[in-house]
Image (cartoon, coloured by chain):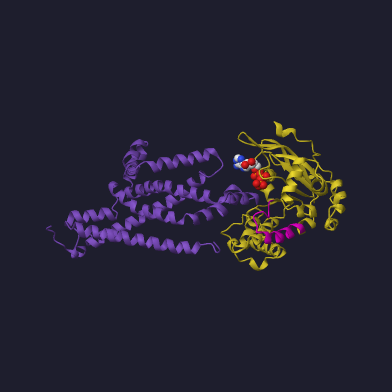
Chain colours: A yellow, B purple
Amino acid sequence: MTSSAMPPVSPVPEPQAAVDAAPGTGPVGTLLTERPPVPATTGPMIAIDGVSKWYGDFQVLTNCTTSVTKGEVVVVCGPSGSGKSTLIKCVNALEPFQKGQITVDGTKIADKKTNLPKLRSRVGMVFQHFELFPHLSITDNLSLAQRKVLGRSRDEAEAKGLALLERVGLKAHAHKFPGQLSGGQQQRVAIARALAMNPIVMLFDEPTSALDPEMVGEVLDVMVELAREGMTMMVVTHELGFAREVADTVVYMDQGGIVEAGTPAEVLGGPREARTRSFLSAVIG
Amino acid sequence: MNYNWNWGIFFEASPEGTGTYADMLLSGLMWTILTALCAWVVAFAVGSVVGVLRTLPSRAAQAVGNAYVELFRNIPLLVQMFLWYFVLPEVLPESWGTWLKQLPDAPFYTAVVCLGFFTASRVAEQVRAGIQALPRGQRMAGTALGLTTAQTYRYVLLPNAYRIILPPLTSEFLNNLKNTSVALTIGLLELTARARAMQEFSFQVFEAFTAATIIYIIINLLVVTVAGVIERRVAVPGR
Ligand SMILES: Nc1ncnc2c1ncn2[C@@H]1O[C@H](COP(=O)(O)OP(=O)(O)OP(=O)(O)O)[C@@H](O)[C@H]1O
Ligand SMILES: [Mg+2]
């Protein structure tokens, strides 16, 4: 088990540190000051504690420990195949794990008594390939789960959907179908679809990496705005500009383990680990 | 060849005394259509369930689905007809067997069940393929929104899968329609059976089977046309 020889990482970044780091995080650090301060008293929204996962004999996650406090934005980065998607899917139990514990807003997700559909409905998720439902109009994409999971009326769900579409700048496209939208537009709809459920936390798995470069900005803008409004977010992305701008914590993963975690300035500015350094130089180019 | 052509035969009275030979063929056509439609309802319902079973995460569900398909797909349809019609009443408790044998229109019900279950194995295979052809992320997106497995299938996976498999389903429907003729072996008076009866009574073999052939072709073309309309109706914009 050589891969477990990773250095101990402060498992729960103290909320205080995240706030302190805010002013000095780069040119757009001012954005952070507009965010509501992270309350130091509440427990973590997501607590990932010693999670290990295997696909057969292959260990994808090795003793991962980290947490996301309410209102915090955590960016997860690392090379391809390092287990970022797997970890984020474990958070809303889309993937089972064999060891450790994950709690979301105090609920243990691996607990047999946990109502997973109900829990998942409160955790928004945005995928690399959007995953809008192609046979439903944008309006229906936004209202399906509101009606079937939350029991909202059609009118209520559509009104909520329309309000969110307006927010992501796509109100005029409500009647269209996913196949009639560009990638960037589809991803913004996907974000609106997740928001329509009034999530307590949003998970993003490489939300911009399937997009043409000219569309990355429009999606990141929506995410930045969300972060500024105080949404709790866990974001897998290689957009280091986004990480510098809005992340409170950057988590670096390699070979299924969390190698390093800290403020963007610490991890992106002067990583302690050689692996992080070589990854960063590869991404920045 | 010394054959007396007589195309007027269709308007002559049949020896059954219930009308002309044309009426006889039309009553056969009615049984063919009725059997095909009822069998399709069974096939579509059972096939969808079995197809879904084969795509569920549960190993046990998959095993049940696979067993169904292998069983019903690998026994010849003719043998299945005989099993349902002649063997089943004998292996059931005696009172049930007697009840089955005395059922009015027993050949019809047997044909519907037999053909329905047989075609279901083929529909199941299409449904499975359709669901598995969808991006894996679709199921995940439904699940992540809080939909239950049943809801994810009902509102996300199946509506997409059915759209993909509409062309192969049409061809299964046509097979199902033509396979009704196998039920003549258990005494169903469907189109082929009636054409044969006409030939035996009148000796006008060419006229009888020409008529049957043309009728089969016409209803098959009708089905293809209707399927085309449905396909355009449910087509998703932007795809
Ligand atoms: N269903 C699966 N069965 C077996 N191995 C898998 C499965 N899914 C993922 N893996 C493996 O697990 C490892 C981690 O995968 P994961 O998708 O989490 O990586 P990632 O960090 O998200 O990579 P990327 O940046 O390419 O998205 C990879 O080595 C991958 O091959
Ligand atoms: Mg990934």
Q: Which segment is the magenta one?
A: A205-224
Q: Position of residue A104 (x, y in %)?
A: 74, 44
- All told, the count of numbered labels is 0
Q: In the picture provided, is A42 more to the left or to the right than A209?
A: right
Q: Is residue B17 visible?
A: no
Q: Position of residue A11 (x, y in %)?
A: 79, 39
Q: Position of residue A89 (x, y in %)?
A: 67, 45
Extreme residue in the top direction:
A1
The one nearer the camera, A272 or B99, is: A272
Extreme residue in the bottom direction:
A172
Q: Residue at x 51, y 40 (%)?
A: B62
Please determine whether, in this image, residue B90 is positioned above or below residue A218.
Answer: above
Quadrant of residue A242 within the rendered picture: bottom right
Q: In the picture provided, is B156 more to the left or to the right than A236?
A: left
Q: In the picture provided, is A128 more to the left or to the right than B218?
A: right
Residue A222 inside the magenta-drawn segment: yes
Q: Residue at x 68, y 61 (%)?
A: A214
